[in-house]
Amino acid sequence: MKQHIFLASPHMSEEGYEKEYIKEAFDTNWIAPLGRNVTEFENEMVHKLGGSRAVALSAGTAAIHMALKAVGVGQGDFVFCQSLTFSASANPIVYEKAVPVFIDSEADTWNMSPAALELAFEKYAKIGKKPKAVIVVHLYGICAKIAEIKEICDKYQAPLIEDAAESLGTVYHGRHTGTFGDYGIISFNGNKIITSSGGGMLLVNTEDAEEKANKVLYWATQAREPAPWYQHTEIGYNYRMSNIVAGIGRGQLKVLDQRVQKKRYIFEYYQKHLGDLPGISFMPMPQDTYCNCWLSVIQLAVDCPVKPKDIMQALEEDDVESRPVWKPMHLQPIFAECDFVSQVQERCILDEECGADSSISGQIFAHGICMPSDTKMTDEDLQRVCKAVRKLWL
């Protein structure tokens, strides 16, 4: 019986680093949302990535929420957010009763288009509005045009939040994603390149990083005041990471470089063994970037007789997991009334079933497939995947 091949699943270190840190937490009875593992995980992440401070939290979504609060986002404020992403990038905007404005992607990186971002700033300036923050995403580990985007945000004095949930280990010009913006978000969800079984991290890169990080820590610990009794002057959240979860994260951080190497190997394998098929292309690899290739994504040409659903069905029949590209936020029913800014002026529906449109992000969604990218995959597994796909071209 064939073994199931996952899209991306947890991969604990062969050396057992995670067990050592978990054992220490149990032996010392520090299993609550504080302890040595939490503190050291934060310190080790800053040492690995750069930046000023890090705060370990219960999820990457919590980190985005805390970043938005730290820049002062509140009711009625506008936040510019990349459309082609998972909903966790946008949902925290609504938590604070702010208004998302979605920005289209560009073909070079599949991420936020600097040109569309500039259009959005100009559009809202005409009505006397400016966003309280900008959220850019490094989709599937591909670095956005972060230098250009940061330059635009600085020009308009808008804080930049980097959603690097999928790009841990990606480096641009020698600098890790998540350290360019005022705030960076890391996720350790079970499908990410390293996992703590859940959890996230907020990187604070501002000049007043110490003050901001302490304020985030305060909010994330139920906004408890330093009094002998439980006293609260602000609404708080139960967002702290446990010492056990942090122990898993510390062990995983030790093998991050290995995981990136394997992810890149998987991507290169697909390029080598599927790249000759007519109509197939691969996610972009921007220059001056070392991409973590969290998920390997293929694109099918518009006129390709094989469609994404054909590939996904063929893989499913062989007990192999795959997935469509993220459905853009501006196409999600919950955000249907939100503004969307794109350089594509005349848009039409490409696929009535899924709702994909002819925006850049809509086209990527309509024609993309996330291929299995599990770091435990063997060459035999990769060969099996490629064989199932190649059959469709016979």
Image (spheres, rainbow, N blue to C red):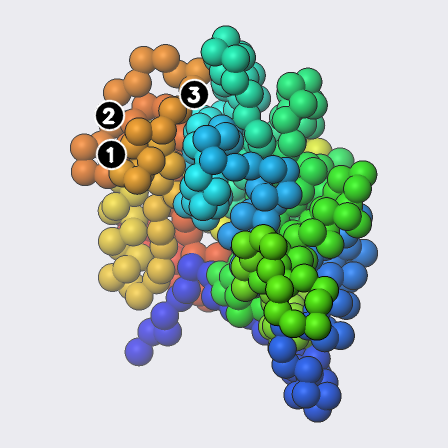
Q: Residue furthest bottom?
A: 27
Mark 1 is on which residue type? Answer: Gly
- Hey, which residue is sitting farthest left in the picture? 352
Bin the neighbour count of mark 1 within 10 Å (Cα to Cα): few under 14, some 14-19, many 20 and up: some
Residue 355, disc? 1
Hey, what amino acid is under mark 2?
Ile
Tell me what residue is drawn at x 35 percent, y 51 percent.
323
Tell me the mark number nearer the camera, choosing from 3 and 2: 3
Q: How far apart are marks 2 and 1 (CA)?
A: 7 Å
Tag 3 residue: 341
Disc 2, SS: loop
Q: Which residue lies furthest to the top in this view?
A: 126
- Which amino acid type corresponds to the residue marked 3 in the rendered image? Val
Query: Is disc 3 placed on a helix, strand or loop?
Result: strand
* Quadrant, the N terminus: bottom left
Say which quadrant the C terminus sits in. Answer: top left
Q: Which badge, 3 or 1, comes first in the chain's sequence?
A: 3
Q: Which residue is identified by label 2?
A: 349
- Vertical relation: 122 (above or below) 268: above
Residue 212 spot, x, y in % from top left? 72, 47
Q: Total marks drawn?
A: 3
Q: Distance between the residues labelled 3 and 2?
A: 16 Å
Query: Which SS class for mark 1?
Result: loop
Quadrant of res 322: bottom left
| Residue drawn at (18%, 33%) of the image | 352
